[in-house]
Amino acid sequence: MKRATVVLCLLLVVGTVLGVVESLNAQEPSLKRTEVLRVDLAGMEGKEAHMWVADIAPGAATAKHSHPTPRFVFVMEGSVTVEFEGGSTQDFTAGEGFQEKPGVEHTFRNASTTEPAKALGFQIAGRGQPLQD
C-alpha cells in the first residue's frame, strides 16, 4: 500500500511538472523569419541586400534592439507595434511600411494577441555584417 502511494505521488508530480512546462512553452509566442533573398549588390562592392518574411505569432515581440543600417518593413498581414527609444509608439497595419533607423533602439511586436501578423523586411549591409545589434 505504501509503495502504491509513493508511485501515485511520483506520477502526480511528474504530470504536474509536464503540465507546467507545456504551459510555459505555450506562453512563448514566436517570430519566424524566412530569408527570401540575400545577394551581393552590383556596383556596391562589399554590400549585400537582405530580404525576409517574418511570421509573427499573436502577442510575439522582440527584445529591445537596434540596427547598424536602415531597415525597411512592409506589413503584409495583421498589424504591428513599434516602440522606439524615448517611448514613442507607432502602429502599422497591412499595406503600410516604415523605417527602423540605424542606432535607434526599439521593440517590435504583433499588435494583436489573437491574430498572427506577417511582414516583409529589407536591409542593405556590409557583407557578413550583423543585421542587428
Image: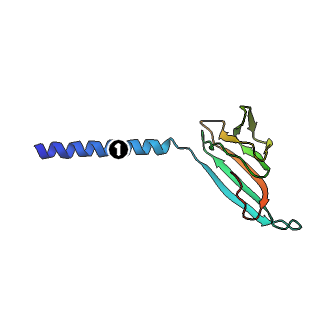
Tell me which colouring the rendered structure shows.
rainbow
Task: Work out whether residue 116 or residue 121 is closer to the camera in this orientation and state it.
Answer: 121
Name the quadrant containing residue 129.
bottom right
State whether residue 120 is above or below residue 83.
below
Instruction: Using the image as rendered, state which of residue 129 and residue 124 is in the foreground.
Output: 129
Picture quadrant of residue 36: bottom right
- Label 1 sits on a secondary structure element that is helix
Left or right, residue 66 beside residue 19: right
Residue at image x 75%, y 57%? 51
Image quarter in which the N terminus is found: top left
Residue drawn at x 80%, y 50% as measured from the top left: 70
Tally of marks: 1
Work out which residue is located at the far right of the displayed protein and give it: 43
The amino acid type found where label 1 is placed reads: Val
Establish if 121 lies above or below 97: below
11 w.r.t. 125: above or below? above
Side of 93 relative to 22 (left or right): right
Q: Position of residue 88 (x, y in %)?
A: 74, 32
**For this view, does 88 lie left or right of residue 15?**
right
Percent of width and height locating residue 4: 15, 45
Instruction: List x then y, in percent, for residue 28.
Output: 52, 43
Viewer-nearest residue: 71 or 69:
69
Task: Tell me the quarter of the picture where residue 57 sits.
Answer: top right
- Taking the view exactly as shown, the residue that stands out farthest to the left is 1
The residue located at (75%, 62%) in the rendering is 37
In front of the other: 59 or 69 = 69
Q: Residues within 10 Å of mark 1 (few under 14, many from 20)?
A: few
Q: Position of residue 119 (x, y in %)?
A: 72, 47
Label 1 belongs to which residue? Answer: 17
